[in-house]
Structures are given as structure tokens and as C-alpha cells.
Amino acid sequence: MLGRELVCTAGGRRVCGRIVEVEAYRGDADPASHAFRGLTPRNRVMFGPPGHAYVYFTYGMHHCVNVVCAREGRAEAVLIRALEPLAGLPTARRRRGTREDARLMRGPGCVAQALGLTRAHDGLDLVAGPLWIADSPARRGGRVVRRGPRVGIRAGLEHAWRFWLDGHPCVSGARSVRATGVRVPRSGAIPR
DNA sequence: GTATCGATTAGC
DNA sequence: CTAATCGATACA
């Protein structure tokens, strides 16, 4: 998913960004996952079929966007943590109210705000739209993929399930953790 | 029923 | 470092 384009036409405006940072959440095997304690009205989309958007509301003010990845019944999803703005910049700037373009879509709350996504978009089919991942080769700009612990969680810190494009200016991360991580080999399975 | 805490962010 | 701000969750 890293390096591909995420496109959103919700709200009548087209906004597009390159995926530069993600985190994996592994359902009932993962104490950091919203699905760890089973199915609830909030997380039900995570338990549904893959290729759908799980959009949740948190901290009383932010939304975050996930791509549901595993077969129905297995609540695995990938959180979109940061995008490199590619299109729809005026719309994204207006929604975000920020002046610095590198920060338009840096951080999961910022991504949802820039794309105009809320709980109303929870469960969107990523084939039908209005949100989808462009079917194009992943362009990583020559950057290597790094991985490290996920951000903003208390349990599950032993898993290096955060992935990002090394050195990319649009990668988020709570303060000091932005650059920590190890290189992901080009071949071979990702270890757990 | 009340208390606590977020897969966060912006500002000081 | 803290406030913001409310739904989900834990617990009496």
C-alpha cells in the first residue's frame, strides 16, 4: 500500500495523496486493536469483508481511516497515518485550515480531515468509491521502507507494525518517534 | 448510574 | 507540557 495513491471524492471535491505511512492492526490477536475485545457497533466494519473503509471517531474530535484487509470475520485493518498531498490541495487547505502543505495530511486525524471523511463514510466500499486506492504502481520516490512500533498505543508496543517511507517529509509520528525504525528487506516475509 | 481513557492534534 | 471534547469502555 505504501507509495500508492489514495483518492477521495467525498463531498464533491477530489483530493488525492500518496500513502507514505501506515500501521497494521490485527484484531483479536492485537491488544492495541479496537477489535481486541470483539465486535461492537463501532468496529463492526473491521469484521466485515476486505476492501472497505473503517472510519472511527476518537478523542471527541478526530476521525481516522483504515482499510479492512482480512476476510470476513477476521478483524484486520491498516490505518492510513499520512499522505503526501498530490491533488485537491486548495480543498485540503480549506478543510485543514493549515498553512504548511507538508502538514496537510500528516497524522491520521489530518488525513481524514483533509479527505473530508467522517463516521458517515464508515463502511465505504473501496471499489465502488467515493474512496479508493488508485490501481497504479506504487511510487516510493526511491525511498526505502522502514518499520517500527506503532504510535499512540500502550499495549502491543512489542510489534513493529508501523511502516513508512524513510525520510519522507510527510511522515507523522508523535514528536521524537518520527525517524525510529529498521529497514524492511525488499524480499522475504515481514516478521511478526 | 459515574469515572476513565483514548489507533490525536495544536498550542504554549 | 496541557486543553479540547465525546464516544466507548470499565466498574459500582
Image (cartoon, coloured by chain):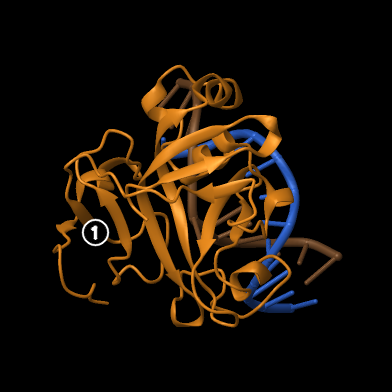
Chain colours: A orange, B brown, C blue
Q: Identify the residue under disc 1.
A: A147
Q: Is residue A137 left or right of residue A39?
A: left
Number of residue marks: 1
- For the N terminus of chain A, the image quarter is bottom left
Q: Residue at x 50, y 40 (%)?
A: A111
- For the C terminus of chain A, the image quarter is bottom left
Give the quarter of the image for residue A184: bottom left
Residue A39 placed where, x, y %? 66, 78
Q: In the rendered view, would you say A65 is above or below A97? A: below
Residue placed most toward the observer, A169 or A123:
A123
Residue C2 placed where, x, y %? 51, 38
Residue placed most toward the observer, A173 or A137:
A137
Give the quarter of the image for residue A25: bottom left
Q: In the rendered view, would you say B11 is above or below A117? A: above
User: Is disc 1 placed on a helix, strand or loop?
Assistant: strand
Mark 1, Cα crowd under 10 Å, few <14 / some 14-19 / many 20+, is: many
Residue placed most toward the observer, B9 or A83:
A83
Residue A64 placed where, x, y %? 55, 50
Chain designation of label 1:
A
Direction front: furthest residue:
A136
Give the quarter of the image for residue A140: top left
Q: Residue at x 45, y 51 (%)?
A: A80
User: What amino acid is labelled 1 in the image?
Assistant: Arg
Q: Is residue A22 left or right of residue A90?
A: left
Q: Residue at x 62, y 80 (%)?
A: A38
